[in-house]
Every structure is written in C-alpha cells, then in structure tokens.
Image (cartoon, coloured by chain):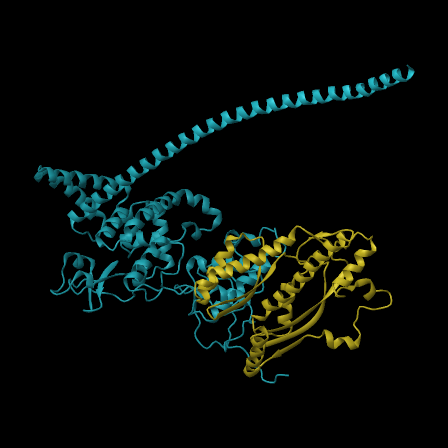
Chain colours: A yellow, B cyan
Amino acid sequence: MKSHSPWGTSKNPVKFRIPTADNLVPIRLDIEIDGQRFRDAFIWNPSDPDSEIVVFAKRTVKDLKLPPAFITQIAQSIQTQLTEFRSYEGQDMYTGEKVVPIKLDLRVNHTLIKDHFLWDLNNFESDPEEFAKTFCKDMDIEDPEVGPAIAIAIREQLYEIAVQNVTSARESRMNKKGRRGFEYIQSSKTSGNGVDIVKLFGHKSTVIRKRKDWDVYEPIVDLLSNEEVDALEAKEERNNR
Amino acid sequence: MATDVVTPPPSKPSPEAPSATTTTPTVDPPPSTTPVTITPRPQEPEADVIHIPSYSRWFSWNGIHECEARFVPEFFDGRSTSKNPRVYKYYRNAIIKRFRENPTRKITFTEVRKTIVGDVGSIRRVFDFLEAWGLINYTGGSTAKQPQLKWEDKETKTAAAAQGGDSTDVTVPKKRFCSGCKAPCSIACFASEKHDMTLCARCYVRGNYRVGLNSTDFKRVVISEEAKTDWTDKETLQLLEAIMHYGDDWKKVSEHVGGRSVKECVARFIKLPFGEQFDGPPESTELDVELGVKNAANPTKKARLSPLADASNPIMTQAAFLSTLVGVDVAEVAARAAVTALSDLGNGKHQESSKAPPSITKQQESDNASDVNNLDSTEEALVKAKLQLEKEEDELEKAISGITDEANEIEDKIVHFEEFDLQMERKLQQLQQLQNLLYFDQLTLLFHKTAAPKTVENAGEAMKSE
C-alpha cells in the first residue's frame, strides 16, 4: 500500500483512518437490560453495509440465547460507534513522525496479560491481528479468546491516538500563531505520548534498549486460578458501578 | 504470581495441533478422497469420524478450492491487502478445527468469532459458507441442515409444528407401520400419541380407525426418504447420468439407478443442491444447458409445490406431488379432463363421458404414481387448483388496471407541472424587464443629479458675478 514515508507530518496531513493495514474499527458493547448484562468486544469493518449490523445483532442474540430486546440495543450501539468513527473520516490527521507506546493490561477468562511496546503510527501497513496471533503463539497461550482481545485492545488505543491527532490538528489550524505553534501544541496535547524517532534513534543512541528498561517492556502472561479470577471480577464490578 | 495452571477445558488435543489430522472426512463409501497427509494421532479417545457431504469432498486443509474462491470472493480479489487467501485459510481452518473438537454439537457463529482474530463481518461470511457446504455443523442423516432447499424447510416446519416443535432434527428415523392396514408408511403418516397409533395417509383419509377416535387426535408426521436408505455417491452419480440421458423419463432413470423407485429418484434429484457441483465449475456452463432445463423445471415445480405442500390436508399434498411427477403438460390435460368430467357430471350427461375422461386421467396417474388416492378427490383437488389460478388471474388484472390508472394520473400531473413551468418563465421575463427599467431610471437619476449641482453652481456663479 503506501510506502513508509512521513505522510503524517504537519505539512502533509493524511485523511483520518486507523493507522493499520485495514481500516477496521474496534467496537465495544456493554448493554444492560432487565438486570442482564451483556459485554462484548469485536472488530468491525466499516466498509460493510449497514444492513450487516442488524444481521449480526440477530445472530449474536440467537447464538447466545439472549432475550430479543437486545437486538435493537446491540444494533444501535454498533451503529453509534460506527457513525462516530465515520464522522472523523473526512478530516485530516497529523501523526507526525511518531512512535507511540501501546500498553496491554487485560484479563481474558483465566489469562492475565500485561505488556508494553512501541508502535509506529506512520506504518500504515501494520497489522494488530498478526501481532496478536504471533503473541499468542510465542507465549503459548492456550485460550483462543486471548488473541482477539489483544487485537481489539491495540486497535482501541490506536483509534484513540488517531482521534487525538485529528482534534489537535483542528485546534492547531485555528491557532494561527505561526508554524512553531503546530509542533508545540501537538506534543503537549498528546501528553508526551509520542516518542520522537530522531531523539530516540539519533546518532548517540542505539536501537537496543537499555537494561533498566527491559522490565518495563517485557510481556507478562499469567494464568490465574478460579479464586483469583472471581476476586478480580468482583473488584472490576465495584469499579464499574 | 499465580502458581496454579488452570487450563481451559478440552482434554482432547489442543487446537494448536495443525493440519495433519486423522479426522478423515468420510462419507459413507470408504475411501476418503481428500489429499491430506494422514498421520495417526495416538491420543484420540473417541473414534472421531467426521461426516461431510459428498459435494464437499474437495476440501483440504492446505489448499483452497475453486468453489471457495467463487463463494467467498472478498478474500481473493485483491481489493484489500489484509483479506488474502492466507487469512481466509486461517479463518476457515480455525472454524473447522473448533467444530471438530466437538462434532456432535452444532457450533454457533458467536462462539467461533470470539476466538478468531479478525473482523466479524468476514468471519461470518466464511462461517455461513462452511455451514452451507456441510463442512461444519453437519450432523449426517438429518435433512434439517441444508439451508438452501425450500422443500426440506417446508418439511421441517410442518413436522416441527405437528410434533409441537421438539427439536430441529425432525425426521423420524424409525420405520413406521400403519396400525390400520399394516403397510409400511412413507412420506407422511399420522400419529396419535394418546392412543399410540400410527396410521398411513390412506387409512387416515378413509377414516379407517377405531371407533372412538377423532381425526383431530392425529398429528401429521413426515418421514424423509433419506432416513430409510441413504443415497450413496455411486447411486447419485448414476441418477445424474440417467437424468442427462433420459431427461424426464423417470421410469428409465429409476431402472438405470437400480434399486430405487421412481419416486425416490425424483425426490433425491430435487434435494440435490446443484447439479454442477459434481462436475466442477468449468463444466458448469455445459451442464447448465443440459441440466438447466431440468433445474428450471424443478424450481418451478418446487415453487408450485410450496403453496400446497404445507397444507395439513394430505390430499392436497398428494395431488401436488403427483402433478410434479407427472409433468406440466400432463397435469394440465388431466386437470382439464377432470373439470370437464365434473361439469358433465353436474349437467347430468354422465355415464359415458364421465367414464372416458376419468379413465384417461386414471391411466396417466396410475402410470406414474405408486400410491394414488381416490380418483374423485384428485379431480376435486385439480379443480380447486384451477379455481385458484383463475382467482389469481383476476387479481392480476385488477392490479394491472390499478397501475394504469395511476400512470394516467401521473401523466396529468406532469402536464400540470409543465404549465406551471411556462407561467414561471413568463413571470421571470417580466421581472427582468422591470429590473431593466429600474436600472434605466436609476441611471437617468444619476445623470440628473450630477447635472443638477452643476446648474446650481452655474447659477451660484452667475449670482456672484452679478
């Protein structure tokens, strides 16, 4: 697809999209009807026609034997998130030459995953799905539900960053105080997330990480026992309420 | 942190075990024709024999067949970089592996998509494709699985309704004997739970049951052909060959197949998904020409079948079935003959004329059917069919006249609009003229204005000079 050139610099904004090979949207559902709670997360292709949404909602409700009241709720929720995504679509995105850190901190059934790595925002051929699959294979994860959860978490973070870049672009355009304003506003608004490649890989530093950073960037995969899972779930419930 | 390793359920080999599988996809005839390296896996506890329908024989773990490229084209047209054959294979193999971990149970789409990394739209399409082709959720012997065939859907619906909807697998595999006439039941029979009796359709219609029973006590149960004897591939091939050679001559077809009655051949042929699958896609065009006529005829037969087939009236279903067996022309002639016969009967000119047409129809029907009902009732049914046809024609006419009326109205409206348009144009022109006039007036005013101060000045000067 696009070559690895600094497309997203302030001089050359790119149209908004998730910076991966596929423009797929992470969707999260959290619906409660009559005391029954349904939580789910999956990846959706926004170029699928909207008729697919209802089909998917019906299929899910039928497969999980949920009460039919869920169908409209699910469809609406998906539709809202998709519309939000599409509302960003026409706008410009300034990604800069940024490499962003992605943090994984999730629990899927009995597996707990913590990880921290860097992701190149300008690589429009990146593929979170491949990353997730390789991660599961390398770490010998047996639970097959972990892979999709990782891919979704990565996409959500990338989505958020992309959205931030759009809004910052809008604001910086409104601020007409000269060129300097661009860079400064970008770096401050995104709370220093972006790591400047030049700084990191300048002539003085190497690609290899310093020893003291190893712990931070190492992936941790834990298998929990039933009691620990229950305890964590109870804590999450309390936090959510 | 955690010391216990609690792994999720399956005691069977983990899903990581890759493409070399022993779950040989077999269909009833022994040799499996899939080009798969078969390496024995020692840990298999149950004898896993996975059944897949014979038209899905092309499936292999490592390869992608042409019909996959045809039915799920989004992965093969190169429009999206992440939708490529490799990803398709990953989805497909993952879904099938998941299903085969527990082949006795139908797997749902939601279960599967939770475990596959990818966007749910594409996963769903692959899942539907695999299910339609029986590579997953194929519990052999049941006819309830194939979503493409309307005839079976009707069957399952009626039987499920009749039995109070106990399960999706509707067919009653055991042989049923009629308590009235002691003959084996086929196609449809009537069961009464209360009195534990089974009656074949004939006995039920004739009222051949004990005193004290009511016709409402009986529920209709449909028996599928396949439950009795499954069609082997050889037989299916023979059937197709025969059809290609003999066309509509079902007697010869059944002879060629050997061991199958005419009715069974026809029923089996109707149930086949697509004739072309047996010969592969490149030949599909030729086959289409040959079998196209058949396929075209069959859908119309099916279409005609459906409105009558779901009636709980066994007579109507028999008549419908007979009419398909017999062919369009013959059925028409028979119907006409029946109508004339009945009308003649009504007029009172019976005896000779009534005997001749009924005998003709009787001959034709007995030629082609194996279990014919009462002659009068079939004639009645055909008459009813005719009436319905006429009714529908009337409705059609009404609809058409309604449409023409509306078309006329629309024309009128268009004419009106054109008039309005003309008026609008005229008004526009007038407006423009007025505008021009105004402009002109303004100009003259300006001239006068500039002229006026000068005259005032001149006058002033003149005054001064004086």
User: Number of callouts in the render?
Assistant: 0
Residue lying at 25% horizontally and 43% vertically, measured from the top left: B388
Rendered image quadrant of residue B205 = bottom left
Query: Furthest-right residue in view?
Result: B465
Q: Is residue B246 left or right of residue A39?
A: left
In screen coordinates, is A50 left or right of B366? right
The image position of residue A168, as x and y in percent, is: 73, 57
Name the foreground residue: A115 vs B398: B398
Q: Looking at the image, which residue is at 30% across and 39% down?
A: B395
Say left or right for B386 vs B45. Answer: left
Residue B208 appears at what percent x and percent y?
A: 13, 60
Q: Nearer the viewer, residue B43 or B97?
A: B97
Residue A236 drawn above or below residue A184: below
- In the image, farthest residue toward the front: B466
| Residue A45 seen | no
**For the point 78% across and 21% down, which residue is it?**
B449
Q: Residue furthest bottom?
A: B3
x then y, percent, for residue B124: 51, 59
Q: In the image, is residue B239 above or below residue B193?
A: above
Camera sees residue B382: yes
Q: Is residue B342 above or below residue B94?
A: above
Image coordinates of residue A139 in percent, x first then y, are 64, 74
Which quarter of the figure is the C terminus of chain A placed in?
A: bottom right
Q: Nearer the viewer, residue B375 or A33?
A: A33
Rendered residue at 63%/56% (across/down): A23
